[in-house]
Structure formats: C-alpha cells, structure tokens
Image: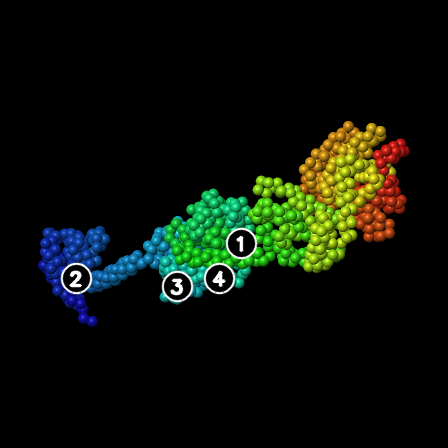
Amino acid sequence: MPAPHLKILIAEDSAADAELEVRVLKQAGLNFEYRVVEDEAGFRAALVEFVPDVILSDFSMPRFDGLAALAIARELSPDTPFIFVSGTMGETYAIEALKSGAADYVLKNNLMRLGPAVERAWHNARERAARRKIEAELAAARERLESIVTSLQDVVWSVGLPSREVLYVSPAARGLFGRSPEELAQRPDLRFEAVHPEDRQRVTAAWEAFLAGGVYDLEYRIVGPEGGIRWIHDRARTVVGPDGSPVRIDGIARDITERMEQHLRLLRLGRIREMLSGINAAIVRIRDRQGLFDAVTSISTRQGGFRAAWIGEIDKETHDVKPVAVRGLPGGFFEGLKLSSLPGADWPTGLAEVAAQNRDAVVANDLEARTKCAYAQRALAAGAPSPASGSHLRPSGAGTAPPSAGARSAACLPLTVEGKVVAVMVLHAAEAGFFDREEVRLLKELAVNISFALELMAKNERIDYLAFYDALTGLANRTLFQERLADFLASAREGERVALALIDIDRFKLVNDTLGMPGGDEVLKKVAARLTERQGDPKAIGRIGGDLFAVAVHPVRDEGELLRLGEAVLDFLEIPFEIEQQELRLTAKAGIAVSPSDGTDAETLFRNAEAALKKAKRSGDRYLFYAPTFNARASEQLTLETRLRRAVEREEFTLFYQPKVSLEDGAVVGLEALLRWNDPETGLVPPLRFISLLEETGLILAVGRWAFHRAASDFVALARRLVKPTPIAVNVSALQLRQPDFVRTVEEAVKACAPFGCGIELEITESMVMQDVQQSILRLKEVRELGPAIAMDDFGTGYSSLSYLSKLPLDAVKIDRSFIVDMTGDAESMSVVSAIISLAHGLGLKVIAEGVETEDQSERLRRLHCDQIQGYVFSPPVPLEQVLQILTRAQNR
C-alpha cells in the first residue's frame, strides 16, 4: 500500500532547522508536501489555505510562541495533530503542551523520532476522525430513533437482565400509564401495580412464563392514577449477548382501548341480542308471570352477562316496588330500602319514577355520582361477577372509577300491561357508562316483548279467571268449588268428616227490586266478604250462582262444630249490612250434607246438600241436614246452647273441688276447681255435655271470669276457717288466654285472696299453649309475676314441644289420667310415666298424677318419686262444704 501523501505545516523561524526537519522526514520515507511559516499571520493563513494534515512547531520563536500556535491550531483546526519540535523545551513545558492538546514533542537533538511521531500522530488523527464520524452517525441515528419513538403513541420499554432494572421507557408512558418514564424507571413495580386487579394474576403469570423461556404477547387492562381504565397490547422479546445469554428484554405496549371498546361493545350487543333471543324463547314457552320473571332475570345474568337483574312489581295502591325475581344480588340487599315509583325512594333518583311516568327506559350510567342514595351505595358494594361479566368490561378515559365487585351503572325498564306500568326490570352493569344508545334500544325492544307477554298472560288469566271464578265476588264458581271440594274429600284422613253447606238468601229478588242491580251486586259482594271472614279460608267459599253460596268445612273438628254449622253461618249473615247508607237485614236458608255419610264424592255431596236446601225452603226451617239424625242432634244441640246461655245469665254454675295430696306425707297441698252446671230442670249436667259447647259459643269467657272470682271467694272462705289455707287451681281455656283482659282477670282474683296469700293457681293444657307458643310464654310470664303457680295439665298427650317446655314459666306438670289408668298393666305406660317424672324433675318442676283410683297406682307413683296425686283414691270432686270437712280432718290429724 503506497504511503499517504501528507501536507505538513512547519512553524519555524530558522530556515536551517526547517530544512533539517524536511530532510529527516524524507529520509523516514514519508510522502509529503510542506509549507514553512515563521509568524502568527502566516500560521493562520496556512491553516486556512494549505489545510495541513500535520503541524510541526518550534516551541520558542522570537516573533511567535509555540503555545500560542497550539491554541490557534486548536481553535481553527482542532482535528489536526500538533507536534512540538524544539531544542529548548523542558519537561515541564512538554507536559503542559501535551495537556493543552499537543499530540507529541520531539527534541531537535533527537530528530530520528520525528518521522515515526508524524506517522503515528497522523494515523491517530485518522482513527479519531473515523471514530468521531461513526459516533456522529450513531448520534444522528439515535436522534432519529428517539424522534421516531417519541412520536409514537406506543410505549417502548427495555428491561435489563438478570437485574430486571428498567433501562428505558419512552415518553408515551405518560399518556398511557399516567406516569413519567422516570417514575417507571425508578419503580419497576409500578407497571404491575397499574394492571387492573382482575387481570393482574394473568399478567404476572405470563411475565414469569416469559422469563422462563415462553412468549410474552397479551392484552390486558391498566388503571391510571386517576382511575382511568385503558386496554393495552403488550409484547416483548429477549435480546441475547455474544455468548448467547439473555442481556435484556425489549418490549412495546400499544393502547388498544378504542379497538377493545368497539370489540367489547359488539360483544355486549351480541350478548344482549342473545339474551333477547333467549327471553323471547322463554316468552313462547312460559305461561305464568312468576316463571317468566324468574327466567328473564336468570337469562339476563347468564346470557346477557349483567352483574345483576331483578324485576319488581308495582303495587297499585301504594306504588311500592316489590322485588319478585332477583339474580346476582346478595340476600338482604333490599332489606330496609324504600323502593317506590314515587319520588323520595331509596334508589337512584327518578329511575322508577321516570320509567313509570314516561313509560320509557331510564339509565343511571354513573352510580358513584349517586353515593348519597342508599340503593346506589348497596349496588356499588354488593354482588359478585357473573360468569359472563367479562363482556361488560367497558374501558374509558380518565375519570372512570376502577370496577369493584358491585355495579357502577344501572338501567330501569318499565313493563306495561294495557298502557299501565305494572312492573320494572332493573339491570346492573359492572362498568360506569355501560348503557349507550344502541344497548338501550335493544333493551327497550326487550321491555316491549316482555310487556306483550305480560299483557297476553293477563288476558289468558282473565279468561281462566272467568272460567273458574265469579267475576262479581271473586269467589270460586261452581266448577272450581266442586274441584276444591273433591280435593278436600280426597285429602281427608280416615275418620275425618267434610261438611258442605249451601246457603240461599231469602227474597233476594226483592232486594234487587228495591236497591236496583248495582245495589243487589253490592249485597252479594258483602255476603261473600262476610262468609269469607267467618270461614277464614277463601278456598272453602264459593258462589254457585245467583244468590246461592257454598261453604265447605274440612275437616270437621267435632260433632259440636258440625251441629252448630248452619246456625253459626246463618247468624253471621243476619247481622245487619249497610248498603247505600241503609241498614239491610238478610235471612237465608241452608242445606247441609256431610261426608262420608251423605256421600264420598263432590257431586253426590252437592246433590244431597241441594236436596237438604230445597227441603229447608219448603219446610221453613232455617237449615236442614241431609241426614235426619243430624237434624235431631242439631236441634238438641241448639236447645242445649239456649239453656247454657240462660245458665250463664242465672249463674246456675258451681265449683266442685278435688284435693291434691302429697305422696311424701299424705297432706292435702292443693285443690283443683272443677266446673259443674246445676240445671234446675235436670239437675247436675255432666261436664262432658257442656264444657266443649261453652268454648265453641264463647260463653267460656264469662263463665271463666266467674270461676276465677268464685274460686277466690271460696279460698277466702276456707282460709278463714282453716289453720293453713290451701291454694285452688283454676283451669284456663285457650280462648281465655288469648283475651286482652285475661291478666287483669287473674290479678283481680289474686287481689281478692290477698289477706291470706296467693290462693289462686292456674292449670293450662299442652294443646292450648302450642297454638301460639311465643304469645303463650309472654302471657303466662305476666301471670307468673302476679304470684300464681302454673301447672301444665294433660302432660304427655303428644302435643308438647320439649324445646319450649323449659321456656314456659311452669311450676308443675300433671300426668294425664290415661297413662295412670294403664300403668299397672302396661309396661309402656309405666315407662312413659317414669320418663315424665324424670324429665320434669330435671327441669325443676313438681309432678302431679291425676286420675289415681287405686292404692296400687298410688304406691307405684310414690316409688317413681311422683310428688302429688289427685283422684278418687283420696276423694272425688266435692262441693265447698265437703272439701272444708276433708281439709279440717287432714289438718287436725
């Protein structure tokens, strides 16, 4: 390779020295041309005109200083190597020269170094120039790349390996992540903290898999510092070093929010259309309203992907909204909320109100803006994502709150029948701003379809209703009532009776003629209402036609109820009605048939009841049974009831007393008051003949009050004549216990005994308490606070719940006589008695055995640790004077 042609500038005031330097350079084999200058002006001109490749300069010249030449060269031609050639330059100046930018120095007494020094300096300068060119090109390329990256909306990032230090993040991070590149570089964890909570686990797993050699290319959501949610497409590749080991990861994150919004919107619309299709199929398939509501809410959450869906019916009178089908909301969500289609309700203001008034869909696209609303607070906090809730991810710009487990927007759709809003359908979406124009349009279409189905159902229900119900009174017509009667008969257990009474209003044509058809219709409606009130079960009442009504009793509790059926129903109807501000009195006739004696099927029972009614209308009787024997017994029952009412008025009742004896010492420790009726015509009437009738007629209330007062009076009479007064137990009926003045009645009796202590005790039955356990407990506790002891009568007859026994304020239990009678010959009865005694003692209660008739029974009870006995073995029930004698003898013993 030929030697390069150099241009050498020599600054030298000595021509000889300059010539010597040229000769030495030529001897060194250099190919060059040169120019010699000896002052600053020539030096400056040569730098511009000659453009040297190398500069040689003497250090000390009379008219020009070498260091000054170096400074000028550094200024005008900084890349040209500068070599000092001097005979006077010391080491100190040489070092200073090198520091100032000189490439080398050569002493004039050692010019052999000059050629190599020039070549080396020139080559070094060439290398520096080439390096600077490369660096400049790299800088330009870097600048171009930075410009390109800066102009990108994508975020370019780089992470070092294995340190995972963030090497670079492009400025676009500020717009996408809402954080500066410096923040992201200083805190690498910020990238993962920004990932949406629902996506974080998936992103972390993908990143770890990528570091282990996998692929990193996924789409996920991020949440900005202000709560804005955006979708990004993040992908990366691993860069390896010369040895093949990974040195860094380069990646790019692209904002795909707009694309995902469109994609998710299409997906949502597809799901809503799928939901619409599913609900339309349900409309075709389902024939009842509740079934349709359940299907609609289920399909809305399952196929439509809504966070929650519920339907509420609007009450016609109060306008309250009652949820009847709910999906996706936790139990108790509606508890304590006021839901109404009127203003002031506890849900997003105006939703149902506007939906109901305008009969149009209403949307609340930001529930967070309604946090003062109780419903919105619960909707924001409640619920859990449905399996399809991913379809509701609705990315948006800043200001959209990150989703929680609850809903952030809601829509309310009115459901109408014949132009009136009868219900609302509410849909919850997980994201704010979820419901746009197209979605609302589809939901309106859905509401129209559901409303059409409801209207069709209402018409069908009306047709069905008219087929089975009386349009005027709302009672079952003959067809439906006969079906129900058949059901009553089929469900009656063996030995149970079902009664049918057909009731015909007397002279109803006269009522119609007097009051007109509207007035007559009003009478029929009031008769229907009164019969329903009396019977309690609307299914047991029917209007058979015209002024003919039917009443079913199922099952008949006892013969007393059966015998009084006609009288009770007709008496109830004969209470005056008020029609058009007039008092109207009605009379009626009734025919009664009883199953199974008068027929075992509905048709036969109807036919026989009609026959009995016809007979009653011909004979003038108020009512007649189909079976003559019942008529005789009913007449007898009516006579007995009449005599009982007279007995109450004339105070023909008296109290007998049966002693209760301690098995420990044989002492009389108490008396039970037993009601007796002293009929002037027949003498003493057996209790079984009249006690149940007293209860059925309600006369037991008056007789019961009398019994308390008489028992208190008799206690005082005994106490005045005995050393130790003996308390008297009074039996209480269920009807008495339910009366508001019951506690006052007991209190009056207790006060009457006050001078001699609390002389009154109460005996209640298991069956009576179990009719309303909680109320019984409260009422008996009030009584117990007054002082009387309370015993449970007929214990063990199968009515009691042991879970309540410990809660009742009892002092004793009385074992039913049926167990006592059988205990001597029946091991099972003996076991029952033993178990009752053990149980009662375990609860701290005394045990009284009633119906004890033999010494053997008494002895067995004593061995079983029974506390007291009562029965004929000691004394039958006796009048006051006789019991006084018994007590006197017992206390004198």
Q: Hey, which quadrant is residue 697 in on the image?
A: top right
Q: Residue at x 21, y 53 (%)?
A: 100
Residue beneath disc 4: 280
x and y, in percent, of residue 342 in the image:
47, 45
Q: Residues within 10 Å of mark 1 (few under 14, many from 20)?
A: many
x and y, in percent, of residue 660 in the image:
83, 39
Give the Cα distance between marks 1 and 3.
54 Å
First-in-chain label (1 vs 2): 2
**Residue kind at label 3, given as amino acid type:** Thr
The quadrant the C terminus occupies is top right
Q: Nearer the viewer, residue 548 or 741?
A: 548
Q: Residue at x 41, y 63 (%)?
A: 217
Residue beneath disc 2: 53
Q: Residue at x 46, y 44 (%)?
A: 343
Q: Secondary structure at mark 1?
A: strand
Residue beneath disc 3: 238
Q: Hey, which quadrant is residue 465 in on the image?
A: bottom right
Give the Cα distance between marks 4 and 2.
93 Å
Q: From the image, state whether disc 1 or disc 2 is nearer to you.
A: 1
Q: Secondary structure at mark 2?
A: loop
The answer to the question of whether label 1 and label 3 lie on touching residues, with beta carbons closer than 8 A, is no
With respect to residue 719, does 142 lie above or below?
Answer: below
The answer to the question of whether label 1 and label 2 lie on touching residues, with beta carbons closer than 8 A, is no
The answer to the question of whether label 4 and label 3 lie on touching residues, with beta carbons closer than 8 A, is no
